[in-house]
Image (tube, helix red, strand yellow):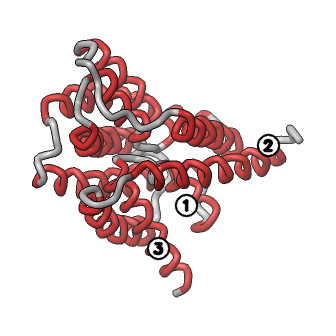
């Protein structure tokens, strides 16, 4: 029963981060499933895609009702990302669990440093065209399929600085992209390890509530302070994962 409560809290926090920041919470899903729930890294990647995809879809629905969603950009960015995510889904099967978690930890470290060093963009002097949008979508899709993360921490800045969307519209649009990429990545993992449907259902249900709360909080909470605090936590967790998995691989 205690584990169920922990799963509910984790799912809610991940969903709220997605709704509030347009990304970020998904970077915690795989470590939570591996270290707290006890799943293998490969199974956690697959489960993460379901959880993140469902939470993002709920957050996108709420942003749509607020008018902060650009469907044209979402479909182009997400469409090419879906193809890339599906193709990259099989890559995680080629690595041992410790190597996969080490790569995930390195990604977390980069994400945390990026979130601290680069202030959240507030606008753009026009976009750089659809080629940049397509290239960005492919890059995020590859990462989603391989590591099971939504990539919102990269999508939002790309949509603002490269495509030229206002920040609030970029947050809503990123959630559509994350949902599309997660679906494609999950389809690519169907022949992988089975997922624990009960755990996924708990994370999804709690995450949907969290995404709804997070999307509504964007009206009253400025995300910058939360983003920086979250980045510090991600960096600390990344260091722990690196030390733990480097030890398992005999590097230290």
Name the front one of labels 1 and 3. 3
Labelled disc at residue 33:
1
* Residue at image coords 64%, 43%: 105
* Residue at image coords 41%, 38%: 120
In this rendered view, identify the residue nearer to me: 249 or 213: 213
Distance from disc 2 to disc 1, alpha carbons, whole Å, reads 19 Å
Of helix, strand and loop, which one carries label 2? helix
Distance from disc 1 to disc 3, alpha carbons, whole Å, reads 13 Å
User: For residue 216, which quarter of the picture?
Assistant: bottom left
The residue where tag 3 is placed is: 9
- Kindly check if marks 2 and 1 are in contact, taking CB atoms under 8 A apart as contact: no
Q: Residues within 10 Å of mark 2 (few under 14, many from 20)?
A: some
Distance from disc 3 to disc 2, alpha carbons, whole Å, reads 29 Å
Whole-percent x, y for residue 6 in the image: 52, 76
* Residue at image coords 43%, 40%: 153
Q: How crowded is mark 3: few (under 14 residues within 10 Å), some or many (20 or more)?
A: some
Whole-percent x, y for residue 107 in the image: 59, 37
The residue where tag 2 is placed is: 246
Of helix, strand and loop, which one carries label 1? helix
* Relative to 71, residue 158 above or below: above
Of helix, strand and loop, which one carries label 3? helix
Describe residue 234's horizontal placement relative to residue 88 as left or right.
right
């Amino acid at each position: 029963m205690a584990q169920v409560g922990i799963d509910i809290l984790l799912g809610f926090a991940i969903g709220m981060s997605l709704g509030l920041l347009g990304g970020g919470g998904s970077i915690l899903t795989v470590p939570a499933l591996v270290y707290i729930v006890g799943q293998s890294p490969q199974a956690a990647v697959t489960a993460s895609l379901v959880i993140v995809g469902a939470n993002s879809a709920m957050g996108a629905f709420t942003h749509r009702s607020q008018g902060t969603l650009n469907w044209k950009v979402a479909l182009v960015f997400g469409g090419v990302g879906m193809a890339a995510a599906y193709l990259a889904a099989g890559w995680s099967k080629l690595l041992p669990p410790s190597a996969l978690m080490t790569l995930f930890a390195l990604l977390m470290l980069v994400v945390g440093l990026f979130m601290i060093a680069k202030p959240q963009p507030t606008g753009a002097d026009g976009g750089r065209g659809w080629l940049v949008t397509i290239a960005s979508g492919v890059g995020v899709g590859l990462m989603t399929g391989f590591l099971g993360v939504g990539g919102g921490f990269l999508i939002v800045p790309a949509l603002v600085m490269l495509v030229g969307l206002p920040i609030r519209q970029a947050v809503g649009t990123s959630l559509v992209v994350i949902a599309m990429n997660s679906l494609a990545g999950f389809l690519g993992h169907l022949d992988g390890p089975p997922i624990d449907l009960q755990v996924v259902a708990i994370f999804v249900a709690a995450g949907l509530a969290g995404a709804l709360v997070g999307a509504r909080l964007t009206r009253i909470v400025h995300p910058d302070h939360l983003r920086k605090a979250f980045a510090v936590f991600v960096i600390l967790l990344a260091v722990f994962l690196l030390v733990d998995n480097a030890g398992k691989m005999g590097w230290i």
